[in-house]
């Protein structure tokens, strides 16, 4: 009886320890024309063969973990997403953009950067994964701006599932126009000025005179990037995807609306729509109060919204985990 009791105690103690083992997170690199890109490949403990997800971050100086250099602090939302995948037995790769973190070797001057560079970089990473014999199924996950990049990959390469997290549904110029109009403090004259600038950029014209209050949006060095980004329409891209698709948005997202997710879902009737009440842009639980909402962008201790994790895991079990 004593031996049996001891065995039960050992089993009780060891099982949680096995489950609590952290996944392996190793740095990996791939070469593109601009230089060497770096990322983190996370694999569950004991991973041999199986599925892998490519995680693509949002716009601006956002790193592989989902943290913005502009805002400061960390939320680690994309790293947490990778850890959730690992608990399902799915590997993942998240990477730094050109000039950031592990990808400083591939730094590119802003004036020479176009949106297609981000697409080709993500494709290089997908090719990297598909060259590895250990990976048998491939998921593309794009957050915010990364959603559009992920759509392009899902249409250009053979992948098994696509997930859009807080992805805009309109072209970037239309998105900016709506965002500017959502602020009641912006006078009509300013809105008209912004429309004129964006229309010229979209037509391929270089706008030399940019007022100080629009420098951050339309400075001369970023205009080629904006022009190249404007030509892509998320509604057209997602319509062409013919694999399982999950579209996710939160009700307290201050950057991308629930209506964006609904428009994307309408454009791909086979897709699944997941709207999370009380989830914001960085996939955390928050109110719509701006100060409280933005505080979550700098809180790495706050977990992913539990209902998001539940819905995300359910989709993965349905379409990916075999």
Image: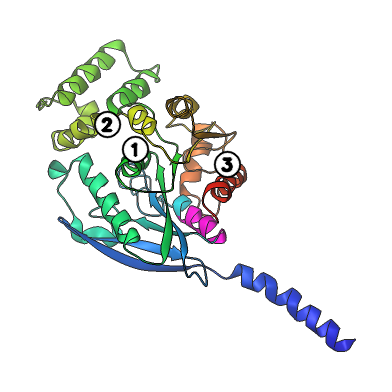
Q: Position of residue 239 (x, y in %)?
A: 38, 30
Residue 148 is tagged as 1
Locate the C terminus by quadrant: bottom right
Mark toward the start of the polypeptide (3 vs 2)? 2
Mark 3 or 1, closer to the camera = 1
The answer to whether residue 75 shows anywhere in this view is no
Kindly check if marks 1 and 2 are in contact, taking CB atoms under 8 A apart as contact. yes
Q: Is residue 83 magenta?
A: yes
Mark toward the start of the polypeptide (3 vs 1)? 1
Helix, strand or loop for disc 1: helix
Left or right for 21, reference 74:
right
Whether 151 is drawn above or below 256: the answer is: below
Hey, which quadrant is residue 156 in on the image?
top left
- The residue positioned 60% from the left and 46% from the top of the image is 314
What predominant SS class does the magenta segment belong to?
helix
Check disc 3 and report the residue beneath it. 285
Helix, strand or loop for disc 3: loop
């Amino acid at each position: 009886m004593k031996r049996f009791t001891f065995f039960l105690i050992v089993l009780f103690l060891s099982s949680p320890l096995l489950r609590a083992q952290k996944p392996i997170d190793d740095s990996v690199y791939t070469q593109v024309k601009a230089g060497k890109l770096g990322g983190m490949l996370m694999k569950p403990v004991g991973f041999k063969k199986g599925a892998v997800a490519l995680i693509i971050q949002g716009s601006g100086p956002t790193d592989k973990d989902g943290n913005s250099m502009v805002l400061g602090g960390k939320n680690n939302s994309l790293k947490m997403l990778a850890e959730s995948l690992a608990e399902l037995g799915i590997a993942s790769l998240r990477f730094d953009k050109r000039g950031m973190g592990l990808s400083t070797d591939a730094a590119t001057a802003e004036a020479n950067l176009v949106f297609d560079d981000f697409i080709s970089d993500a494709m290089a990473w997908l090719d990297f994964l598909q060259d590895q014999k250990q990976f048998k199924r491939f998921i593309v996950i794009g957050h915010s701006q990364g959603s559009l990049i992920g759509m392009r990959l899902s249409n250009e390469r053979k992948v098994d599932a696509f997930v859009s997290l807080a992805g805009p549904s309109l072209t970037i110029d239309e998105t900016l126009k709506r965002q500017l109009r959502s602020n009641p403090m912006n006078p009509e004259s300013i809105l008209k000025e912004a429309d004129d600038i964006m229309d010229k950029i979209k037509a391929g014209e270089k706008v030399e005179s940019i007022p100080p209050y629009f420098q951050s949006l339309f400075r001369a060095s970023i205009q080629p990037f904006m022009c190249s980004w404007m030509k892509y329409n998320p509604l057209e891209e997602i319509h062409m995807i013919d694999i399982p698709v999950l579209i996710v948005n939160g009700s307290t997202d201050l950057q991308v609306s629930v209506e964006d997710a609904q428009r994307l879902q309408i454009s791909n009737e086979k897709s699944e729509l997941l709207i999370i009440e009380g989830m914001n842009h960085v996939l955390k639980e928050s109110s719509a109060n701006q100060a409280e909402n933005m505080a979550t962008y700098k809180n790495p201790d706050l977990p992913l919204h539990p209902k998001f994790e539940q819905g995300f895991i359910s989709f993965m079990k349905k379409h990916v985990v075999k």
